[in-house]
Image (cartoon, rainbow, N blue to C red):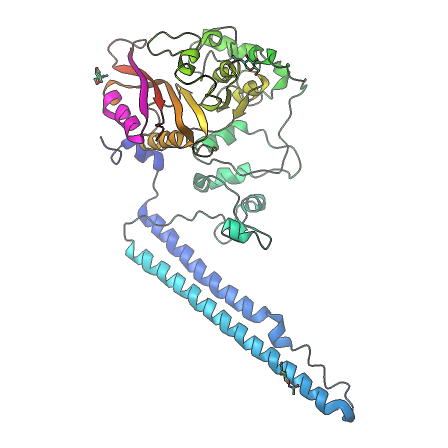
Amino acid sequence: MGAEDSPKKQSYYHPPSPRMAALKFKLKIAMLVLLTNLITLCLFSSAPRPFHLPRLSLPIAWDAASSSSSLVAHLNSTFAQLAATHSRIADLHRQLASSNSLVESLLVELAGSRGGRPHDDLSIGPASDGNLPDELKLAVGPHKLPLGHSPRVGSDVVHPPVGAACLRFKEELAQYMSYDVGGECPTDDVFAQRLLLKGCEPLPRRRCHPKSPAKYAEPTPFPQSLWTTPPDSSVVWDAYTCKSYKCLIDRNKQRGYFDCKDCFDLQGREKHRWMYDNGNLDYGIDQVLATRPRGTVRIGLDIGGGSGTFAARMRERNVTIVTTTMNLDGPFNSFIASRGLISMHMSVSQRLPFFENTLDIVHSMHVLSNWIPEAMLEFALYDVYRVLRPGGLFWLDHFFCEGPQLNGTYEPMIGRVGFKKVRWNAGRKVDRGPQKNEWYFSALLEKPMT
Ligand SMILES: *[C@@H]1O[C@H](CO)[C@@H](O)[C@H](O)[C@H]1NC(C)=O
Ligand SMILES: *[C@@H]1O[C@H](CO)[C@@H](O)[C@H](O)[C@H]1NC(C)=O
Ligand SMILES: *[C@@H]1O[C@H](CO)[C@@H](O)[C@H](O)[C@H]1NC(C)=O
């Protein structure tokens, strides 16, 4: 099954029906034509200099003696102004002609794109979205830059970023941007995260204050903070079913689906993770670090790092790890931060906010797996490759898939992206019954030096 005909991919992208999209596009073009003409009209009718001729104050006070020469001078300057006005009008005509030809070429393109993918309007502008909150329009601009900044930016306006998919969820986006400016933000963490997970990432910025924890105390000093469960009072629990860390820890004794079930129990399974290498799927941190010259793994990223234990263990080895995580069922970001580690609230869909060839190591456990649509996963792997420095390590920890996908899909994909295998282990996953052909693989991969 190729990437093109994957049903996962199709359900992920939700393309709009071509007819509807074409209709919308035509409407937008009509608006554009109208707008262009309106602008032209405005320019002509409101231009102050050419039509007021305010300098022509001559008839009021001129005596016969000096009149003739001063009149000539006046007339001379008036003619000069008229000449300038003429050339401005000519300029405007030229601009109008070029914008008309732009509209024409757009129309031609539209006519020719029968069945082709129409252009999606990625701008939130007053022209197309009259009913969106003003606060949203203000947040996403465009904002005009001061003179002199345009060359570096390549534009004289900035459109502060929001995820392109935000435009597919305009009602939710409008709700997200409805609040009292300067006041407390709505308690909408779950709502906001759901919007983000659907692809509206980044969310637009807001001008309100998040609710603060009722009794925030100074954090536990480092390094004790690494293995201390913070007080419940350090978290706003509104968004979660559990209202305490004890509740979150006790979840693993219950049945049912929870994300990262035992992650919050720092004295339980977390205490032993990555401490031992079983020679198979479980790699040890020390064994992985030993594959590189001492001290050369210094900075990195843990994608979907749960409660931050990987970063904590690396911190104990003087390696700085940034952990990305969602707050699914629990305050993962707050918890990681309380441990004195850096958390980032970011989904696996987003481009990694690091520059290319910079990180020594990227780790990911249980998160990158076969639930991610194939095409999207390949982009993610290329992105990991991008941010790793040459010789950098990608530790793909417990990647879950079906038997045929292991050799049929994922192993070739990893090779295609360009990673070199340092270590590779595959093992059957049997906890849901031996009749299921489910597999894990763990891999230590390297971005080649050259
Ligand atoms: C009119 O203005 C031009 C320059 O703007 C100048 O060269 C010319 O001498 C002026 N003529 C008179 C009569 O003032
Ligand atoms: C971490 O760095 C400190 C200070 O540079 C050093 O004393 C310590 O031995 C290092 N720990 C490890 C595990 O390398
Ligand atoms: C994948 O291929 C290897 C040989 O390259 C083979 O040993 C292994 O059994 C295959 N795994 C599965 C799950 O088919």
Residue shown at 64% from the left, 39% from the top: 181
Answer yes or no: is residue 130 visible.
Answer: no
268 left or right of 439 in image: right
Residue 15 point in image, percent of width and height: 34, 41
Residue shown at 45% from the left, 27% from the top: 359
Residue shown at 28% from the left, 24% from the top: 410
Tell me: residue 369, above or below residue 79: above
**Front residue of 227 and 326:** 227
Answer yes or no: is residue 192 visible.
Answer: yes
**Which image quadrant: the N terminus?**
top left
Residue 322 point in image, percent of width and height: 50, 24
Quadrant location of ligand 3? Answer: top left
- Asked which quadrant contains residue 357, the reply is top left
* Bounds of the magenta segment: 406-427
Inspect the magenta stretch and tell me whether residue 395 lies in it: no
**Front residue of 441 and 327:** 441
